[in-house]
């Protein structure tokens, strides 16, 4: 056996083995995002599905992210053709109901889909408690760096993205993030105290 050739072969293969080892240690579903910790991209999108009282908004109303400052905003990108969106739908709707009356706002953003198909899907799913908006040309999705649906962004009371979730978001994860951000939302919503001279 030629030890010199064997050593060269091992040295040549070592970087490739290290690369494979690194690749196998990574989660292929984890898509890093530069957005958490930064200001959420602004949007002004039109409501096509009003949701249910007390969370409903009128058809044609415009949802401005800037007007949600002081609240925790849950921005969920979804589509009627998205299979995994079905598995998170009930949990999102129920969670939105649970946070009704608190400084939390849920918004569904339709991704590369039509209003007619989306409304039919919502009806098939038994309704949706919170409003859904159109995203013409998927421009808002592009601003948020959406790779596919479902993707959920949780925006804090100051308008910064606190968390991004790729895939169906479990209610436990959703509640954990909302609950951790609620004290700041309540503080932002509280009227300022009068100063005592």
Image (tube, grey):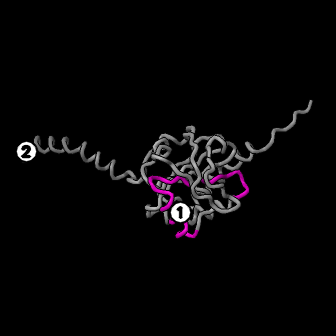
Q: Secondary structure at mark 2?
A: loop
Reply yes or no: does residue 34 show up in magenta. no
Specify start and end residues of the magenta stretch as a single range: 100-126
Q: Please give the name of the residue rendered at 65% of the width and 40% of the height, measured from the top-left corner.
A: 158
Location of mark 2 (residue): 2
Q: Quadrant of residue 9?
A: top left
- Residue 122 screen position, x and y as percent: 54, 65
Residue 114 placement (x, y as % from top left): 47, 56
**Residue reaching furthest left?**
1
How many marks the image carries: the answer is 2
Which residue appears farthest toward the top when viewing the image?
A: 197
Q: Inspect the magenta stretch and tell me whether residue 117 lies in it.
A: yes
Residue 30's disc number: none
Write down the quadrant of residue 156 in the picture.
top right
Q: Position of residue 98 (x, y in %)?
A: 68, 62
Judging depth in this view, the residue of 5 and 166 nearest the camera is 166
Mark 2 nearby-residue class (10 Å; few <14, some 14–19, many ≥20): few
Give me the residue at 31% from left, 50% from top.
Answer: 21
Q: Marks 2 and 1, Cα distance to the nearest angstrom?
A: 71 Å
Vertical order, 114 against 45 (above or below): below
- In the image, residue 48 sits, relative to residue 124, either above or below, namely above
User: Judging from the image, what secondary structure is the residue with disc 1 in?
Assistant: helix
> From the image, which quarter does the C terminus lie in?
top right
Left or right of residue 186: residue 66: left
Q: Residue at x 74, y 47 (%)?
A: 186
Residue located beneath label 1 in the image: 119
Residue appearing at x 62%, y 55% in the figure:
59
Q: Nearer the viewer, mark 2 or mark 1?
A: 1
Residue 55, percent from left and from top: 67, 58
- Image vertical order of residue 177 relative to residue 43, above or below: below
Which of 129 and 166 lies nearest the eye of the viewer?
129
User: Dot 1: within a 10 Å radius of its alpha carbon, few (fewer than 14), some, or many (20 or more) residues?
Assistant: some
């Amino acid at each position: 056996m030629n030890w010199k050739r064997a050593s060269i072969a091992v040295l040549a293969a070592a970087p490739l083995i290290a690369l494979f080892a690194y690749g196998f240690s990574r989660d292929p579903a984890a898509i890093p995002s530069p957005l958490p910790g930064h200001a959420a991209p602004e949007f002004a999108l039109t409501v096509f599905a009003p949701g249910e009282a007390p969370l409903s908004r009128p058809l044609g109303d415009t949802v401005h992210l800037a007007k949600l400052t002081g609240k925790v905003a849950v921005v969920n990108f979804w589509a009627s053709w998205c299979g995994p969106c079905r598995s998170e739908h009930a949990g999102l709707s129920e969670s939105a109901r649970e946070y009704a009356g608190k400084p939390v706002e849920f918004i569904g953003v339709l991704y590369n889909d039509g209003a007619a198909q989306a409304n039919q899907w919502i009806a098939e799913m038994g309704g949706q408690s919170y409003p859904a908006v159109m995203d013409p040309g998927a421009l808002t999705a592009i601003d948020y760096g959406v790779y596919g649906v479902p993707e959920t962004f949780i925006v804090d009371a100051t308008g910064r993205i606190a968390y991004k979730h790729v895939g169906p978001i479990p209610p436990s994860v959703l509640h954990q993030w909302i609950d951790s951000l609620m004290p700041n939302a309540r503080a932002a919503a509280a009227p300022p105290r009068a100063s005592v001279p």
